[in-house]
Amino acid sequence: MSGYDLVRFFDGSTGWIWAAPQSQIYPMLRRMEQAGLISGDEEARGPRLTRTVYSVTPKGHGELVAWLGVAHDAAPPRDPFMVQALNFDMIDAGDAAAVLEAFIAEQEKAAAEAEAHRDRLLRRDTALLKERLTRRDPEDHERIARLKAHVFDGIARVARVRAEWAREGQRLLEE
Amino acid sequence: MSGYDLVRFFDGSTGWIWAAPQSQIYPMLRRMEQAGLISGDEEARGPRLTRTVYSVTPKGHGELVAWLGVAHDAAPPRDPFMVQALNFDMIDAGDAAAVLEAFIAEQEKAAAEAEAHRDRLLRRDTALLKERLTRRDPEDHERIARLKAHVFDGIARVARVRAEWAREGQRLLEE
DNA sequence: AGGGTCATGTAACGCGTTACATGATTAC
DNA sequence: GTAATCATGTAACGCGTTACATGACCCT
């Protein structure tokens, strides 16, 4: 992919899992190329405009597979919303309920989006999945699609649980 | 609290929600004092050792209450574990199952700790809650304890859902 | 001719991580 | 005396955010 492709990539479904701002893409591509993890090919896109398409090198692929295969420590938690919720007793109950309402809307939107993406994956209806499956045994296609769909199913389920939890919080505030 | 108190504070139950490394505490205290959000009092702790105890100023309290009372945009997601899970098809199924196993253990440990803390809060059995309640109407004590306990109940529930989801993932890998 | 998209960058600032570093006081 | 705890800092480095900045190409 080119830097520009990656910007759009992180704006799409991958963005539910890992966000990356445009300003980080280009410096990071150069650092990764220097480290030998990816290599760039210049492509002409008109007389004056070029784009650089990067590919993962064998070294980069090896490091990725190694990283994928071992468990990593969880990142230290940093959850501003829970800090808010822990201190709802400091503010007006109506304000707290409104904060929860916004949280519920956000979680249900996230859940709906994750569910929609899960279903697209099950139908093998996304460009990225189709492209990946071309290099795989057709016997495995069903299994791979279900594995990837399961990830988005998990994201959706967590969001639903959080929304339900927030609704209970609203009931507690009314007491 | 003093800087040292805060280091231990973030190592305790608050650490499930917001972690802060020791190296950030002291510079941040000075920046917050400069901003007028907190003020420090020097206390002698022996002939040569002093500690600085910080209190929230009215300005700091006001900003906190204002922040607590409005909904904030969610932080962009950045979930390394989900990146792993999305690419389990690139690695050996046994390795993937082992990564999930570690995840399950971690989530169940987190859930158990959150549940234990929830129950301590319901029994009003934590130093911080007791201290906070001294400045509140006894009629509200039950309600406040239940609100705070509900936060940890939510953390526990999410962790249980994640663990159950990971177990399903292990079953999918076996196919 | 103009707007939308393609394409690539830079700069400033703050936060988070890891590691290093020092010394006083208390309890055994 | 010595180990644990109390107490406070600094430095280097990378990542993330916001904002700024430029220009080519394509379609109507």
Image: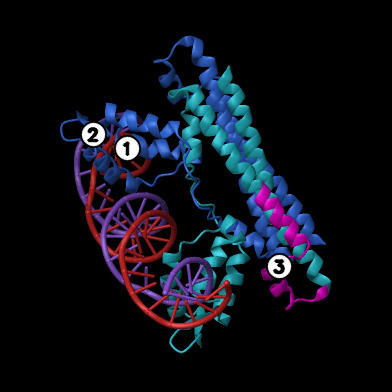
Chain colours: A blue, B cyan, C red, D purple
The residue type indicated by label 3 comes to: Asp
- Where does the image place residue B57, in percent across and percent down from the top left? 55, 81
Looking at the image, residue B47 sits to the left or right of residue B72; the answer is: left
Marks 3, 1: nearer the viewer: 3
> SS at mark 3?
helix
Q: Earlier in the sequence, mark 2 or mark 3?
A: 2
Q: CA distance from mark 1 to mark 2?
A: 9 Å
Tell me whether circle 3 and circle 1 mark residues in contact (CB < 8 Å): no
Tell me which segment is drawn in magenta: B112-138
Q: Are marks 1 and 2 on the same chain?
A: yes
Seen at 54% across and 66% down, the residue is: B8
Say which of A70 and A100 sits in front: A70
Q: Which residue is mark 1?
A: A4
Q: Which residue is mark 2?
A: A51
The residue type indicated by label 2 comes to: Arg
Looking at the image, residue A160 sits to the left or right of residue B89; the answer is: right
Q: Earlier in the sequence, mark 1 or mark 2?
A: 1
